[in-house]
Amino acid sequence: MTLTQRLGHYEKLMRLDKPIGILLLLWPTLWGLWLAAGGIPNTDILVIFVLGTVLMRSAGCVVNDYADRNFDAHVERTKNRPLATGKLSSKEALLLAAGLSLCAFLLILPLNRLTLELSVLALFLAASYPFTKRFFAMPQAYLGIAFSFGIPMAFAAQTGEVPCMAWLLMAANLLWVIAYDTEYAMVDKIDDLKIGIKTSAITFGRFDVAGVMLCHIIFLGMMTAIGVIHQLGVIYYAGLAAALGLILYQYRLIHDRDRAHCFKAFLHNNWVGATIFAGIAFDYLLTATL
């Protein structure tokens, strides 16, 4: 195998060729930074969190594929992943995950102690999530905690504390993660049932679509409450209204449980996250210019 080929396999192992995971992790982190900073986050902190998101998402993907290396070959969507096909070894995967995690930790060393302490917990959550699919009926909830931990870290880095608002935003995001990752799990539902993997799509059973939409709606309700508490303006609520429209479109995609449509709905959540961020950012920008 040439070096170019090996690097290509590393890229696939880290999912750098499929950046949707990075974006879904990044948007709530940016919500947290903007809300914590009142619309003007520290530039150095912003850069650190963006780069850290890329590194930690990449490390999480590597650990996930290591944990699922004996399962992925039996799932249609994952059968060609580098570890499932033997293109890369388990040792290489572990070394890569360790290297990415180390780089992420070095990146946040300039930040305050509270942020560093929270990063240890965030690393544990990211590393342990893939193994919850063996025993936890709804691993998407655990993933929701892991994918939301950039929020308290953002508040800690920006303000030196983690107020109740950060935990409320984290809880809202957790519900959003359950919603979109259940859509993702609906794609693999048949294969997961065969190999014994546990997912929220299986746990919800025939109520999977209802579960997804309920999580989405409660998420938007909590985001509305956050807007009221933060005294955000009409642009923010316009963003939430647009996000609601996007979520209703997702219902049209998933209601028949077609695999391709469910995967499209999952990918579509990038626009939900981006729309809400735009609402937050432009609302603060308008307030600053008045």
Image (tube, rainbow, N blue to C red):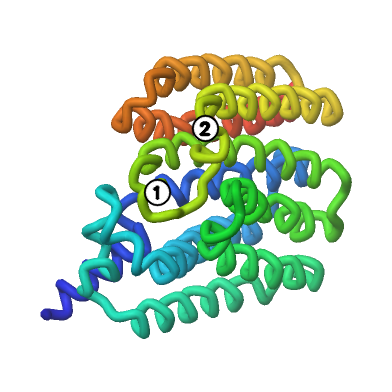
> Which of the pair 276/110 is nearer the observer?
276
Mark 2 surroundings within 10 Å by alpha-carbon count, few (fewer than 14), some (14 through 19), many (20 or more): few
Q: Residue at x 62, y 69 (%)?
A: 123
Which quadrant holds residue 243?
top right
Q: Quadrant of the C terminus?
A: top right
Q: Residue at x 33, y 50 (%)?
A: 18
User: Callout 2, which amino acid?
Assistant: Gly
Q: Is residue 269 above or below residue 150?
A: above
Q: Which residue is mark 2?
A: 205
Return the x and y of residue 214 as percentages of the image width and height. Answer: 63, 24
Mark 1 surroundings within 10 Å by alpha-carbon count, few (fewer than 14), some (14 through 19), many (20 or more): many
Query: Is residue 39 visible in the rendered structure shown here?
Result: yes
Q: Residue at x 56, y 69 (%)?
A: 127
User: Callout 1, which amino acid?
Assistant: Asp
Q: Secondary structure at mark 2?
A: helix
Q: In the rendering, which numbered label is found on residue 192?
A: 1
The answer for how far apart the CA atoms under marks 1 and 2 are is 13 Å
